[in-house]
Image: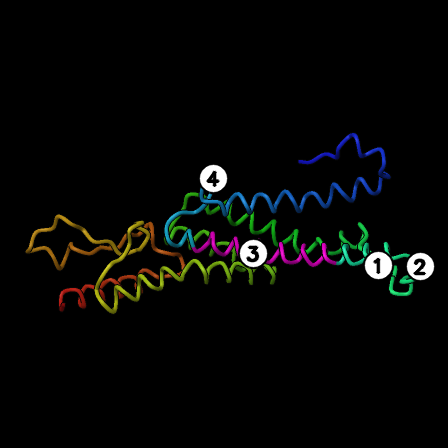
């Protein structure tokens, strides 16, 4: 995926070159997550639930950038102390120097997280609504606590708009769904004698896997009752 600059590789040992190539893998996955979180690339999820996923990806990127900023500040402080000369030599600690070995030890967790974010975001391309939620839900229970926690955080963010749509439906009998991602849909051209039976139906492709069909039918019926009582 990456290769070192031929002009500069001659100044590196074989070990240093290998470590730099390993570190570059984190940059690759970071760039993939950036791509999935950019609405102009057409690689992202869509709809209000897709926007929630994008916001969560951007939050993850911001947290990662914060960690990198801490490392950068540490390097800058070490350089400043080193440039002050012998008078401040007692303030320098060889353990404070950020070496390639220390970076490799640090990058394992961010790399693992970025890899999973990339895998999840890639699976969610051009998906919306319940289909999007189901796709993320499929990544649960894989045996890795970090991944499960990450997926739960993503699901919580994604389902925010869904919860609001359900609440509006069962409390007000209304549907606010400009992206057609809610699992209850309204049919426009319905005869007066068929309003109760055909006006509102389930949109099964948008039904999340974690919402049983029996529960979905109850939600549909509750909203219908409220709608017709208005």
The image position of residue 182, as x and y in percent, is 31, 55
Distance from Cα at disc 4 to Cα at disc 3: 19 Å
* Image quarter in which the C terminus is found: bottom left
Quarter of the rendering containing residue 126: top left
Residue 41 got which mark? 4
Q: Disc 3 designates what residue?
A: 60
Q: Residue at x 52, y 53 (%)?
A: 57
Labels 3 and 1 touching (C-beta < 8 A): no
**In terms of secondary structure, where does tag 4 sit?**
loop
In this rendering, position of residue 139 left or right of residue 189: right
For numbered disc 1, what is the local secondary structure?
Answer: helix
Q: Earlier in the sequence, mark 2 or mark 4?
A: 4
Identify the residue position indicated by label 1 in the image. 81
Look at the image and tell me in which quarter the N terminus lies: top right
Q: CA distance from mark 1 to mark 2?
A: 10 Å
Residue tagged 2:
86
Of the residues tagged 3 and 1, which is closer to the observer? 1
Q: Residue at x 87, y 62 (%)?
A: 93
- The Cα–Cα distance between marks 2 and 4, rounded to whole angstroms, is 52 Å
For the rendered model, the colour scheme is rainbow
> Is 154 in front, or is 135?
154
Mark 3 or 2, which is nearer the eye?
2
Tell me which numbered mark, 1 or 4, is placed earlier along the sequence.
4
**Secondary structure category for the residue under label 3:** helix
Q: Which residues fall within the magenta stretch?
A: 52-73
Q: What's the residue at 50%, 56% (across, down)?
A: 56
């Amino acid at each position: 995926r990456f290769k070192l600059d031929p002009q500069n590789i001659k100044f590196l040992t074989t070990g240093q070159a290998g470590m730099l190539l390993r570190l570059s893998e984190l940059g690759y996955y970071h760039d993939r997550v950036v791509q999935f979180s950019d609405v102009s690339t057409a690689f992202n999820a869509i709809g209000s639930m897709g926007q929630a996923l994008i916001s969560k990806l951007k939050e993850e990127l911001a947290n990662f950038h914060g960690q990198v900023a801490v490392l950068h500040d540490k390097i800058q402080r070490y350089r400043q102390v080193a440039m002050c000369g012998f008078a401040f030599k007692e303030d320098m600690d060889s353990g404070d120097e950020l070496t390639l070995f220390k970076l490799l030890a640090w990058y394992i967790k961010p790399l693992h997280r970025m890899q999973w974010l990339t895998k999840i975001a890639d699976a969610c391309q051009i998906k919306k609504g319940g289909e999007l939620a189901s796709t993320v839900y499929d990544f649960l229970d894989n045996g890795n606590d970090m991944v499960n926690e990450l997926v739960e955080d993503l699901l919580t963010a994604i389902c925010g708009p869904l919860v609001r749509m359900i609440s509006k439906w069962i409390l007000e009998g209304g549907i606010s769904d400009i992206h057609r991602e809610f699992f209850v849909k309204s049919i426009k051209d319905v005869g007066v004698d068929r309003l109760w039976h055909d006006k509102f139906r389930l949109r099964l492709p948008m039904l999340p896997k974690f919402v049983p069909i029996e529960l979905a039918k109850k939600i549909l019926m509750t909203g219908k009752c409220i709608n017709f009582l208005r």
